[in-house]
Image (cartoon, rainbow, N blue to C red):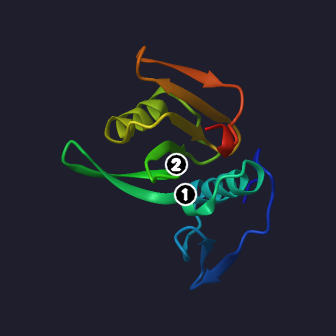
Amino acid sequence: MLNLNLPPFNINVKKTDGKLSVWDPLRRKFVALTPEEWVRQHFVNFLLTEKGYPSALVANEIQINLNNQKRRCDSVIYDRNLTPLMIIEYKAPDVNITQSVFDQIVRYNIVLKVKYLIVSNGMNHFCCEMNYVDQTFCYLPDIPLYTDL
């Protein structure tokens, strides 16, 4: 798999019947190793080890109901009261981060109304802080530490 703009770590990959899978410690199971999953595992590891996000407050593949359709947020970060605080959308490293990617995460945020949105393809990472009072957002220069949320 491709080197990412994220810290490397000892990722647990196995091959079964010719197919690669990766251990997801948050879901506590092996999942298919796709390029997007490679990004997810590296980004979550980055949040846990570098940014101090508690693993108990990070969840992968969270289902929401958007306009009577089931959708899945790639990752959701919760505050200590288990209120959603951040949505993260991952793309494969060869997928450009475009307006349509942001549109996707904004649609998910119609349901969750979080304070932070992150989009990453493993190479480029964008974090927005939402301001619901002024109905604006601003891009942050870096991914915040959990203690700064």
User: Secondary structure under badge 1?
Assistant: helix
Mark 1 crowdedness (10 Å alpha carbons): few <14, some 14-19, many ≥20: some
Query: CB atoms at circles 1 and 2 under 8 Å apart?
Result: yes
Residue at 53 percent of width and 44 percent of height:
88
Q: Is residue 137 above or below residue 55?
A: above
Residue at 56 percent of width and 38 percent of height:
118
Inspect the image, locate mark 1, and give the three-letter code of the amino acid beneath it.
Answer: Leu
Q: Is residue 22 left or right of residue 7?
A: left
Of 9 and 18, nearer the camera is 9
Label 1, label 2: how far apart the Cα atoms are: 7 Å
How many circles with numbers are drawn on the protein?
A: 2
Instruction: Name the residue furthest bottom.
Output: 17
Inspect the image, locate mark 2, and give the three-letter code of the amino acid beneath it.
Answer: Asp
Q: Position of residue 81 (x, y in %)?
A: 46, 52
Q: Quadrant of the C terminus?
A: top right
Mark 2 crowdedness (10 Å alpha carbons): few <14, some 14-19, many ≥20: some
Mark closer to the chain start, 1 or 2: 1
User: Secondary structure under badge 2?
Assistant: loop
Q: Is residue 19 left or right of residue 66?
A: right
Q: Is residue 112 above or below residue 102?
A: below
Q: Is residue 143 left or right of residue 113?
A: right
Q: Is residue 30 above or below residue 80?
A: below
| Residue where numbered disc 2 is placed | 79
Q: Position of residue 76 (x, y in %)?
A: 49, 50
The image quarter in which residue 127 lies: top right
| Residue where numbered disc 1 is placed | 57
Of 26 and 126, nearer the camera is 26
Q: Position of residue 102 (x, y in %)?
A: 47, 31
Residue at 73 percent of width and 47 percent of height:
51
Instruction: Name the residue furthest front.
Output: 81
